[in-house]
Image (spheres, rainbow, N blue to C red):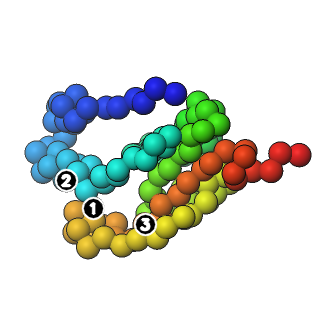
Amino acid sequence: MKPTKWYLGEFSNLLFKELSFKSFVKILLFFGSLSHEKKENEIHIDFITVSKEYRGTGIGTELIELVKNSADQSQFVTLYVSKNNNAARKLYERLGFRIVKEGTSIAGRHLHGINQWYFMEWKGIDNNEKEI
């Protein structure tokens, strides 16, 4: 799978048109605090969200499955999730992800209110799921 990347310039232009200056700055700080150094063969999901009115309809599952299905056998998928976001964590676990690390962030608490998180990983059928 070829990496897909949104560039900050494109994303920030879109945000700036839609948000107040204060909200725009908060969002940029939020994304800036979510840096992750990818490993070889890693597909990392930086950020995923589904609008409230569409939650529970299977869209989140479809998005994650799309990423998983595009990974080849040598690749694995990772993401961070807030320790307080039980619904998302349970979704990821149901889809075969497992918690590999827990962490805290003082900066995260001040920037976006999230100071505890899980790092989760999916390694595919060979590593996570038993084929019957």
The picture places residue 94, in percent across and down from the top left corner, at 68, 54
Inter-mark Cα distance, 2 to 1? 8 Å
Seen from the viewer's position, the closer of residues 86 and 71 is: 71
Of pointers 3 and 2, the one earlier in the residue sequence = 2
Total numbered circles: 3
Residue type at mark 1: give it. Answer: His
Mark closer to the observer (3, 1)? 3
Measuring from the top left, give residue 66's x and y in whole percent.
59, 33
Sequence-earlier tag: 3 or 1 = 1
Q: Residues within 10 Å of mark 3 (few under 14, many from 20)?
A: some
Query: Residue furthest toward the right?
Result: 132
Q: Which residue is mark 1?
A: 112
In the rendered structure, the answer to whether residue 12 lies left or right of residue 73 reads left
Identified by mark 2, the residue type is Leu
The residue to which callout 2 is attached is 29
Q: Residues within 10 Å of mark 2 (few under 14, many from 20)?
A: some
Label disc, if present, on residue 117 of the rendered structure: 3
Using the image, tell me which numbered label, if any, was put on residue 14.
none
Residue in the image at 34% along x and 52% along y? 36
Q: Amino acid at mark 3?
A: Trp
Q: CA distance from mark 3 to mark 2?
A: 17 Å
